[in-house]
Image (cartoon, grey):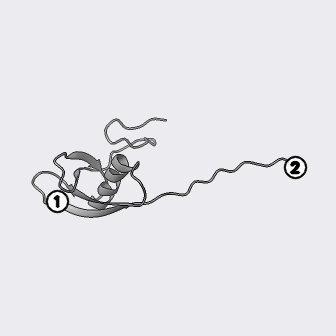
Amino acid sequence: MSFCKNCGKYMFGSHVCPPEWEATMADEDCIEKAFGHDACSAAEQFAEDNFAAYDYPEEMEIWVRKDQSDRWLKFDVEVHPVPEFTVTEKEDK
């Protein structure tokens, strides 16, 4: 399995990174890179990359912009648990 060193996505064939955005939690000073085809998907990916270990459900405000010349776009992001299933075949007795 090969992951892109820039965006962190799994590389299928000829990989092209999604557009790069700046992202932060509301009222935080730390600005990080986020990748997405639009601001909404960049906010979602930023939350997934940085806050997947939060207790569920969790709501946070994520700010995203293209660069310093743009205004912040603000999103409420909710983290939800995802069901996971394990199947084990039973032997007949």
Asked if residue 19 is positioned above or below residue 57 in the image, the reply reads above
Residue name at image x 22 percent, y 51 percent:
24
**Residue 92: numbered disc:** 2
Residue name at image x 37 percent, y 41 percent:
8
Amino acid residing under circle 2 = Asp
Quarter of the image for residue 55 reads bottom left
Q: Position of residue 3 (x, y in %)?
A: 41, 37
What kind of element bears circle 2? loop
Asked if residue 13 is positioned above or below residue 41 in the image, the reply reads above
Q: Is residue 34 left or right of residue 78?
A: left
Q: Which residue is mark 1?
A: 72
Q: In the image, which is nearer the foreground, mark 1 or mark 2? A: 2
Q: Position of residue 28 (x, y in %)?
A: 18, 51
From where the camera sits, is residue 37 visible?
no
Q: Position of residue 4 (x, y in %)?
A: 37, 38
Figure disc tally: 2
Crowding near the residue tagged with mark 2, few <14, some 14–19, many ≥20 C-alpha atoms within 10 Å: few
